Amino acid sequence: MNVNVNNEYINNIDLGNLPKHVAVIMDGNGRWARTYGKKRIFGHTNGINSVRETIESCVELGIKNLTLYVFSVDNWKRPKSEVNALMKLLLRSVKNEIDDINKNNIRMRIIGSIDKLSKSVKNELIDASNLTIKNDGLNLNLAISYGSKTEIIDAFKQIIGKVKKNIISIENIDEKLINDHLYTKISKNVDLLIRTGGEFRLSNFLLWQNSYAELLFYEMLWPDFRKKDFYDSILTFQKRNRRFGKTN
C-alpha cells in the first residue's frame, strides 16, 4: 500500500465536505475475466488492485469509514470450486496487506454471518482484524458472508432479548438504538455508495444504512476502477444537494 497524496487528483476536492462513510459494491470481476478468456478467479485476483487503491484514496483524503462488499450470503450459492478459490484469495490478500494496513493506522473489521465460514478461515480473519484493534484511522469494514436482511434480523433479536431481560423498554427503541445493534455500529449510516459493473441495485447491501446515501453506478468493471475514479466519485458527491427531506 502506497499512501501518497496525489495533488493532481485532489486539488478540486473540498476536504471539509467529505463523506463520512463510503460503501462499495465491487461488481464485475467475473465479466472482466471473461474478456481476457480467463476463469472468474482471474478477475477477482486483479480486483485486489482496485481494493488497494480505494483504501489508499480513503486514507489520503481522511475519510473515516469504508465498507467493501467482499462476499455476500448469496455468494454461497456459487460453485464450490469458485467459493474455495475466493476464500483462499481472501486469506492470501489479508495476509499480504495486514502489515501495511497496520502501518497506515487502519482498523479492519469483519462484518457478516462469519459463522458460515469454515473454522480456519473465520479464525484467521479474526486474528488479522485483532492485530488492528488499537488503530484509530480509517475504519475498514470487510463485508464477508454478509446480508443486510440478516443483519437487521440479528439486530432485532438482540434488542428483543434485552427487552425480555428488562435491560431496555419498548419505548426506548428508536433509530439510534437500532444503529447501535447493527454490524456497522461504529461506522453508522452511509453517505456515498459506489457500485461498478453496470448493475442498478443494492443487492441486499447495507439497506438500513443506505437510506439517505448518494448512489453512484458505473458501467466499468471493478478491476478497472482506480484512484482517479474514486476521486471523481467524491467530486460528484460534493456536487449533490443533500436535503434529507428538507427544502433548499
Image (cartoon, rainbow, N blue to C red):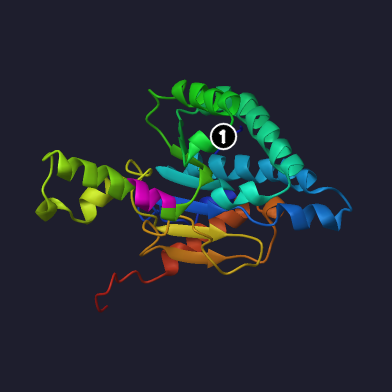
- Horizontally, residue 145 falls left or right of residue 213, namely right
Of 204 and 43, the residue lying toward us: 204
Q: Which span is picked out in magenta?
A: 150-154
Residue at which label 1 appears: 117
Of 30 and 60, the residue lying toward us: 30
Indicate the quadrant containing the N terminus: top left, top right, bottom left or bottom right.
top right
Q: Is 197 in the magenta?
A: no
Q: Toward which corner of the image does residue 242 lie, by quadrant? A: bottom left
Q: Magenta region, mostly helix, strand or loop?
A: helix
Residue 17 lies, with reference to residue 186, above or below; the image says: below
Query: Which residue: 48% across, 56% down?
Result: 205
The residue type indicated by label 1 comes to Leu
Q: Residues within 10 Å of mark 1 (few under 14, many from 20)?
A: some
Q: Secondary structure at mark 1?
A: loop
Percent coordinates x, y for residue 125 in the rendering? 54, 27
Percent coordinates x, y for residue 65 in the rendering? 41, 44
- Horizontally, residue 103 falls left or right of residue 154, namely right
Q: Is 151 in the magenta?
A: yes
Percent coordinates x, y for residue 66 in the rendering? 46, 45
- Horizontally, residue 44 falls left or right of residue 60, namely right
Residue 88 lies, with reference to residue 240, above or below; the image says: above
Indicate the quadrant containing the C terminus: top left, top right, bottom left or bottom right.
bottom left
* Outermost residue to the bottom: 247
* Outermost residue to the right: 37
Percent coordinates x, y for residue 233 in the rendering? 53, 60
Query: Which residue: 32% across, 43% down?
Result: 185
Query: Which residue: 67% across, 66% down?
Result: 219
Query: Which residue: 83% across, 47% down?
Result: 39
* Outermost residue to the front: 164
